[in-house]
Amino acid sequence: MIDMRYTLLLHYPEPNDEELSPEAMAEGQREFTAYAAALQAAGVLIGAEVLQPSVNTTTLTAVDGTLRVQDGPFADTKEQLGGTFVIDVPDLDAAIEWARQAPSISWGSVEIRPGATHTVDGVWTPNHGVAPGNCPTQ
């Protein structure tokens, strides 16, 4: 069976320093360490990142041909993209099972998005299960 790549996008409210105790931060780090270790042990983890707070975001747009650089995230919401995990699993059901185990699901949402294409040694490669011609780089 050929596996499919999925990105788990972790969205949750960003705590400020007063809301998050050092103990709570340490517990969250332990939970994410265990989660990443479980994904790695299962052989499905491709990569993961915890992102810096959204105040450090820079968003670019050029819809009308004019480059605009905006400080902060484009969307003005309480929940922000806080991190990602890229996994390679047999199907959406397996991706859902791994997403269900993400520690942040108890305080935010986990979006599961199938990959269409990715790079291998700098070359764009269609994801397994993507029909030829439906890949944005083809």
Image (cartoon, helix red, strand yellow):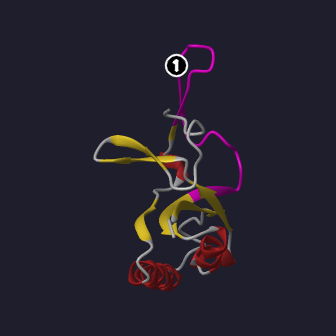
Q: Is residue 107 above or below residue 63?
A: below
Residue at position x 55%, y 47% from top? 116
The extreme right residue here reads: 77
Amino acid found under the numbered disc labelled 1: Leu
Q: Quadrant of residue 81?
A: bottom right
Out of 67 and 98, give the one closest to the viewer.
98
Q: Which residues are magenta?
A: 59-81
Asked whether, in this view, residue 120 is left or right of residue 70, the answer is left
Asked whether, in this view, residue 76 is left or right of residue 65, the answer is right
Tag count? 1
Residue at position x 49%, y 67% from top? 87
The extreme top residue here reads: 65
Instruction: Verify whether residue 132 appears in magenta.
Output: no
Residue at position x 46%, y 56% from top? 52
Image coordinates for residue 31, horizontal then vertical, percent: 50, 84
Out of 7 and 84, give the one closest to the viewer.
7
Q: Quadrant of residue 44?
A: bottom left
Image coordinates for residue 63, horizontal then vertical, percent: 62, 20
Residue at position x 49%, y 78% from top? 25
Asked whether, in this view, residue 107 is left or right of residue 88, the answer is right
The extreme left residue here reads: 121
Image coordinates for residue 128, horizontal then vertical, percent: 51, 55
Q: Residues within 10 Å of mark 1 (few under 14, many from 20)?
A: few
SS of the residue at dot 1?
A: loop
Out of 134 and 38, give the one closest to the viewer.
134
Q: Which residue is mark 1?
A: 67
Image coordinates for residue 117, horizontal then vertical, percent: 49, 46
